[in-house]
Image: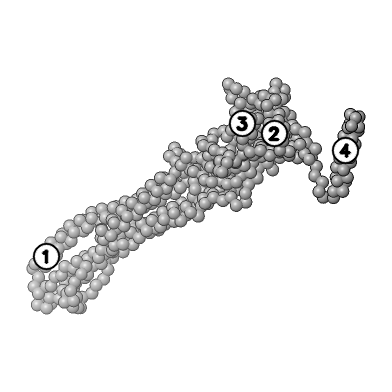
Amino acid sequence: MPFGKHLFLFTYLLLLGKTWVKLVHATETPLSKKVVDGTKTRKVKTNHLLRVEDHDFTMRPAFAGPAIPVGVDVQVESLDSISEVDMDFTMTLYLRHYWKDERLSFPSSTNKSMTFDGRLVKKIWVPDVFFVHSKRSFIHDTTTDNIMIRVYPDGQVLYSLRVTVTAACNMDFSRFPLDSQTCTLELESYAYTDEDLMLYWKSGDESLSTDDKISLSQFLIQKFHTTSRLAFYSSTGWYNRLYINFTLRRHIFFFLLQTYFPATLMVMLSWVSFWIDRRAVPARVSLGITTVLTMSTIITGVNASMPRVSYIKAVDIYLWVSFVFVFLSVLEYAAVNYLTTVKDGKERKLREKAREQALSCTCGMSHARTMMLDGTYSEADANSLAGYTRTPVASAAEEPPEKQERMVVHLSLDNESMGTKKKGLRGLRIIQNTHAIDTYSRMIFPGAYIFFNLIYWAVYW
């Protein structure tokens, strides 16, 4: 067969095959049609599509040009802990960055983005944002690094990571535990000044979102808000700094149960001593020492869970004033016991003098009966006083009220042999169980402590 005929036959078969393919595609239903996107084909490699190998990503986008804007938004996942001793807080959050890098643009007929994990981070440029005043921080890596990069065809980049950070918080405990604390998490670029990189909150105050389930045992979260300003370093220049501010209000009920109520009860317990007989030395001393030691234990327990600050806290004022009230109740009994001892000594001497004078006055009298009454006497002695009158001494009513009551017994002695009646006077001091200092203390101590509480809660509440 001549060569021309072979060529004609081959061309005819080729045209026939193309016609058959067109007919097959024409008979397909619209639902089975699928537009092929170059970004989704397996034959195209990521490096080739993003042209990572063709650019130097050690330099920022638009290098040597204007500052590149980098938007930031944050979603707070949890506020894990607040430590008063270490003066820090721990927070877990989703940190997202938004910027445009034209070097990562790629052709796409559907304008769909591409999503990558953390393995691409080492190959491209990302903002070098760090947490100012942070003590510890880490990116979660279970089961893989919690990093996501999303690239859009026009070069827009979303860089998101899940991080837990422990940062310092300068707390003021002058009103503790009736205090409110404001802590701040600060974000800043480490290398790029405001002339190279401009950090800003992407959506203003709406750039910060929180989970409604966030709660703390000792604090009530009042509000979250964002701010931004420039920070200056003398050796490197000005930097954009972003702030996440949150205000915490401490729950007072825990400290009312654990600190204030026990301290108040100890002070009230120390007042029981004023109603105990002043001669019951073991009871009053043991009660005073017990309340003092209990107050010392409460003060030690509170200070053990607090940082060693150089100023006075509100709880210190309350506990130490309560301690002073308890200590003064012990000193009050020491004063009462001392004055009672001194007065008893003087009265003993007076009774001895009176006894000597009574004996000298009755030595020349016949059929005379004498009695020395110490405040207690038997029934026989009481019967022997039949016919005698007992009247209070006029001078006793003129004595000051802080002195003990005094009663005297007038004994009329009838001498039948002489036919004359002689009246003799005997003084009897019935010592009361209560000293005048105890009487005043029952009113002064409670009144002063109530007045202190009114001032304290009015100032710090």
User: Which residue lies under the disc numbered 1?
Assistant: 359
Find residue 416 and report its horizontal and vertical position in percent. Answer: 11, 78
Q: Could you give the CA–CA distance between mark 1 and mark 3, rounded to whole angstroms?
A: 116 Å
Circle 1: residue type: Leu
Going 46% across and 42% down the picture, which residue do you hit?
A: 85
Amino acid at circle 2 = Lys
Residue at the disc numbered 3:
122
Can residue 308 be seen here? The reply is yes
> Which amino acid is tagged 4?
Leu
Label of residue 337 in the image: none
Residue ID for mark 4 = 13
Q: Alpha carbon of mark 3 to alpha carbon of mark 4: how far?
A: 54 Å
Q: Is residue 347 above or below residue 108?
A: below
Looking at numbered disc 3 in the image, what kind of residue is underneath it?
A: Lys
List x then y, in percent, for residue 337.
26, 55
Q: Secondary structure at mark 1?
A: helix
Q: From the viewer's perspective, is the residue at label 3 or at label 4 nearer?
A: 4
Q: Is residue 69 above or below residue 330?
A: above
Q: Which of marks 1 and 2 precedes in the sequence?
A: 2
Residue at screen point 29% across, 56% down: 286
Q: CA distance from mark 4 to mark 1?
A: 163 Å
* Alpha-carbon span between mark 2 and mark 3: 17 Å
Mark 4 or mark 2, which is nearer the start of the sequence? 4
Q: Nearer the viewer, mark 4 or mark 1?
A: 4
Q: Position of residue 431 (x, y in %)?
A: 25, 63
Confirm or deny contact between disc 1 and disc 3 (CB under 8 A).
Answer: no
Q: Name the residue beneath numbered marker 2.
A: 45
